[in-house]
Amino acid sequence: MDSLTDKVALVTGAGSGIGRAVALALAREGCRLVLAGRRGEPLARAAEEVRGHGREAFPVVCDVGSRAAVDGLGQSAGRVGVVQVLVNAAGIAPAASFLEMEDVLLEEVLRVNFMGTYYCCKRFLEPMIDAGWGRVINMASTTAKTAYPHTAAYTASKHAVLGLTKVMALETARKGVTVNAICPGYVDTPLTQENARRMAARVGSTAPAVLERFARTSAQRRLMAPDEVAAMAVLLAGPAGDCITGQGVNVDGGGVMS
Ligand code: NAD
């Protein structure tokens, strides 16, 4: 039963939203943090917040959809120690109806959401196995299990992430590593706020009205908070998560029940 104290955790998409909340929650559990993301400024701010909890933080600008960039991230993280907790939270969610969707949109969403998760798993899994203990947590979505209109690219990418998670879990089950996905419903993050603004403009509504529609997809009729998703990541990363692997855990206020 390994505690998280002094473990090196790498969180992608750590500059905002869910990734930032997960990074801070893991810092509170005693992890040393490598924070990866596309934009330097929010990463630097998140790193300062982690240090505010008395933990080391190493921000690394990285496009997770590029294998070369993830190799560079591996080199930077290697100077901190062996990454034993990997949280893949970087993601994008542009919306478009299937008929209107351009190939480039699908390619970009798969590149970031799926290939980004894949590249990071590929780079960091083996050292975890060698160390005899590791945790991979992939931020999927309820769209990994169900579907909403105008989300073909996103839904396909998250189904793929959940599938990858399950296979990796099977292949690591007796190697000291667990691999899980978290499937949040709508979470109150910059991504959701931006989606609400864009959808409102498209359908001639207002962002608050669209957010209200998002909230109604949950049985609790509300958006989730990033900290609620982070709490699940901490559970899966910590000793309580020892026997949980290959799961897609819904954090969605009862919106999806499978
Ligand atoms: P967010 O936009 O607040 O944060 C995502 C972060 O990922 C941003 O900091 C962004 O800069 C970073 N990022 C984007 N592309 C990147 C790339 N190519 N390389 C590195 N970093 C990149 O979004 P969020 O709501 O916090 O979402 C985090 C994850 O949770 C995503 O995978 C998203 O699909 C998933 N998710 C979100 C919700 C929701 O309602 N917000 C629901 C289910 C799942």
Image: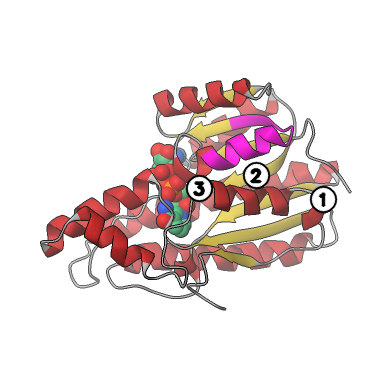
Which residue is label 1 attached to? Answer: 239
Which element type, helix, strand or loop, lies under badge 1?
helix
Horizontal and vertical percent for residue 244? 75, 63
Mark 1 or mark 2: name the one nearer the start of the chain.
2
Above or below residue 143? Residue 65 is: above
Whether 22 is drawn above or below 200: the answer is above
Q: Residue furthest left?
A: 204
| Nearer to me, 219 or 256 | 219
**Which residue ends up furthest to the bottom in the rendered image?**
258
Which amino acid, mark 1?
Pro
Instruction: Classify mark 3 as within 8 Å of ligand 1 or not, answering yes or no.
Output: yes
Within 10 Å of disc 2 (Cα), the crowding (few <14, some 14-19, many 20+) is many
Asked if residue 36 lies in the magenta stretch, the reply is: no
Amino acid bearing label 3? Pro
Disc 1 from disc 3: Cα separation: 22 Å
Label 3 belongs to which residue?
226
Crowding near the residue tagged with mark 3, few <14, some 14–19, many ≥20 C-alpha atoms within 10 Å: many
Span of residues in magenta: 21-34
Contact check, label 3 and label 2, Cβ < 8 Å: no
Q: Secondary structure at mark 3?
A: helix
* Residue 72 x %, y %: 55, 30
